[in-house]
Image (tube, coloured by chain):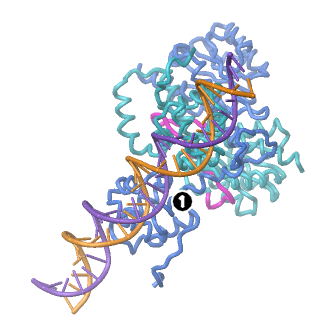
Chain colours: A blue, B cyan, C orange, D purple
Amino acid sequence: MNKPAEVLKAPESVSELLERLDDRLEDMPKRLKQCASFTRRHLHLIAVSTVSEMAQAVGVAPSVYMRFCQAVGFSGYSEMQDLLRSKFTDFRPTYDTRLANLSEERELSTGRLLADFAEAGHKSLLSLSNTVTSDRLDRIARGMAEARVIHLVGLRRAFSVVSNMGYLFEKMGVPASVHFKAGMIEGHGAVLPGDVLFAVTFAPFSDETLRLAKATSARGVTVFGLTDSGACPLVESAREVLIVREDEVIGFRALNAATTLTTALAVSVSALRQRS
Amino acid sequence: MNKPAEVLKAPESVSELLERLDDRLEDMPKRLKQCASFTRRHLHLIAVSTVSEMAQAVGVAPSVYMRFCQAVGFSGYSEMQDLLRSKFTDFRPTYDTRLANLSEERELSTGRLLADFAEAGHKSLLSLSNTVTSDRLDRIARGMAEARVIHLVGLRRAFSVVSNMGYLFEKMGVPASVHFKAGMIEGHGAVLPGDVLFAVTFAPFSDETLRLAKATSARGVTVFGLTDSGACPLVESAREVLIVREDEVIGFRALNAATTLTTALAVSVSALRQRS
DNA sequence: GGCAAAATGGAATGTTTATTCCACTACTCT
DNA sequence: AGAGTAGTGGAATAAACATTCCATTTTGCC
């Protein structure tokens, strides 16, 4: 008998809740078990759903789900929901005051930074949708899909962008290679006609990347580019250049727009190749 | 005159909503502006809050917030909330809607893909703000700031995340090293007590990364983790684990939430180090 | 400085949602 | 097999909530 009384305290954290679910799962009636196992897997839904929605998702009557909440130790659904919602509202204290438009608090908390970067991410994605024309993107995708091998180059900040593309291409079976040092392929004939070079560089532009793009282009190989400024010399050597603008937070930029764009591009290239 | 009539359609996606906010910000009265600017920064709260809670957070009366929703084009708060909640309840509309959409337009345009990925990015960023608590993030930032050296490991899809962190740390003068193969540092004593290991792995989890985290933790070195599921074994060996969920497009995920989070983390770590 | 138009916040209203109640069903134990 | 007990779902009730209305205040303009 490990349940001396029916007076259970309500779980106070998500982990307690999960423990409780596992603990009581055995000695629960059928319907309650359904609730428990679904709920365990979809905890996050509670925060944004009503009892009826939950009950429907589980496949039981609302009153049953209600009884389930109580069997777990809560007074009702609302109390359980509060627990799941509370972690969402953690950020609130920072902004709780009525002076919400006073955005000049120089206190640097990590949470605040995250909120700022998330905001910058939203802006970058918006700008991305507005500035990149889909026909240019289509031309690039088609050009890359027809290539024998896609060579990817990007250094420093751009490296994580191309390494992501490299991973995607590999996973999808598209012949591609990521070049860690531009010098390695320059002049060695690794990039042949029929190939395509996709070069990524952000201001201040990498000389190495620019030189490689120029040399490759001069040898008659198609070059596509991705950068963050129309002033990038890449526009001279590349057949098409994509420009994305990343919003910054205290001088730092995340790579939301660039990774989103290149991910979409990679998926599209793979889809085009499979079609032919 | 870009506002020909007061009959605005309700935004149907997060990006439309953000655009609308930017668009109408200027010609809004003071209180409405407060609503707009707070809401823009804390979109994620809407899904789990009531009008009164939102109004209080902004510092206005509930009726004002109500009017704000209508000024943006919604019929009321509930409609706006539905939009923000829809991303959580993905499991229901996703299968039906997405499959229908896909079969309807057999034409896979790259531009369409980009729009999908951008929207998924918005959702991922919202979810990020929802699921990561700022105190956990703070503890991790502090832990990493105190480390002698920060070791970064992440393979396959996670590699581009850690390589970005590595670049940021290098640029900001924080001692850090990116490990390309987990095996290289395992058992070689490269990771010493006083160091910190930051491990990133997404489902299906990399054995190599998991083993390294476990071994490192067993030797008394602090391990922090970043993954996309609570079921990740990393939670057992790491002192703290961050969980981010990325929205997917036809089975593919971009890395918006993960890179945004790690960028914020890296900047914060650097700031904390400079303070001491 | 006074008038009109717009904006604001509190209180009233109608709707949705949680919660409880109870009649009914399906077990279990003898 | 039959009485008793636990389980279930629909319908009734109560609470929370979104939304609207209106009196009051503020703002912009002459």
Depicted A30 relative to depicted B195: above or below? below
Which chain letter goes with mark 1?
A
Residue at figure coordinates x 42%, y 45% from the top left: B91
Picture quarter with the N terminus of chain B: top right
Residue at figure coordinates x 74%, y 47% from the top left: A110
Magenta-drawn stretch contains B254: yes
Q: Nearer the viewer, residue B196 or A69?
A: A69
* Left or right of residue B264: residue B173: right
Quadrant in the rendering for residue B189: bottom right
**Residue A58, x across and y down, in percent:** 36, 56
Magenta-drawn stretch contains A187: no
* Left or right of residue B136: residue B146: right
The local crowd at label 1, few if under 14, some if 14 to 19, many if 20 or more residues have their Cα within 10 Å, is some
Range shown magenta: B235-256
Q: Which residue is mark 1?
A: A82
Depicted B51 relative to depicted A268: above or below? below
**Residue A109, x across and y down, in percent:** 76, 48
* Left or right of residue B276: residue A144: left
Quadrant in the rendering for residue A34: bottom left
Residue at figure coordinates x 51%, y 63% from the top left: A79
Residue at figure coordinates x 35%, y 38% from the top left: B96
The answer, for residue B228, to whether it is visible in the render is yes
Query: Which SS class for mark 1?
Result: helix
The answer, for residue B160, to whether it is visible in the render is no
Quadrant in the rendering for residue B44: top right
Amino acid on which disc 1 is placed: Asp
